[in-house]
Amino acid sequence: QVQLVESGGGLVQPGGSLRLSCAASGMRFSLDQMAWYRQAPGQERELVARIHVSGYTQYGDSVKGRFSISRDPAMKRVYLQMNDLKSEDTGVYYCNAGFRGTTPWWGQGTQVSVSS
């Protein structure tokens, strides 16, 4: 059973930075994609950033140029560097992982709050 554990959330002022980490364990295979999603109160969960084992990355429109996703070579850890944070970035950030076209695994989430 794949387990994902997020860390690095917290409270930050607008314009500040945070770095989220997600550690994957329990696999008997190598994951081929990992991603970060977020969910604000009363809103649907949305894609923040995704990275494939090939290195291909994809970002949500609202975070392009401010956030950067990266991974370790073994595809067991994924990171999200968040810069120039805005109040609208507030939400619970979830790590997601996939294998062979499916993305069924989710972490418990970590809260990110951007407020002065």
Image: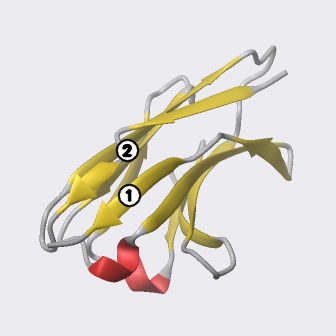
Task: Using the image, determine if residue 16 lies above or below residue 60.
Answer: above
Question: Disc 2 residue type?
Answer: Leu
Say the numbered circle drawn on residue 102: none
Residue topped by disc 1: 112
> Which coloring applies here?
secondary structure
Q: Is residue 35 left or right of residue 87?
A: right
Secondary structure at numbered mark 1:
strand
Rendering coords of residue 65 (x, y %)? 27, 76
Task: Using the image, determine if residue 53 lies above or below residue 17.
Answer: above
Dot 2, crowdedness within 10 Å: few (<14), some or many (≥20)?
many
Tell whether label 1 touches label 2 (CB within 8 Å).
Answer: yes
Question: Disc 1 residue type?
Answer: Val
Q: Nearer the viewer, mark 2 or mark 1?
A: 1
Q: Is residue 74 left or right of residue 3?
A: left
Rendering coords of residue 76 (x, y %)? 56, 25
Kindly tell me whether residue 17 is visible in this rendering: yes
Residue at image point 37% right, 44% down: 20
Residue at image point 71% right, 26% down: 3
Instruction: Identify the mark nearer the N-term, 2 or 1.
Output: 2
Q: CA distance from mark 2 to mark 1?
A: 9 Å
Q: Is residue 74 left or right of residue 42?
A: left
Residue at image point 57% right, 75% down: 41
Q: Quadrant of the C terminus?
A: bottom left
Task: Using the image, determine if residue 47 lies above or below residue 105.
Answer: below
Rendering coords of residue 102 (x, y %)? 87, 50
Kindly tell me whether residue 51 is visible in this rendering: no
Residue topped by disc 2: 20
Secondary structure at numbered mark 2:
strand
Residue at image point 52% right, 59% down: 92
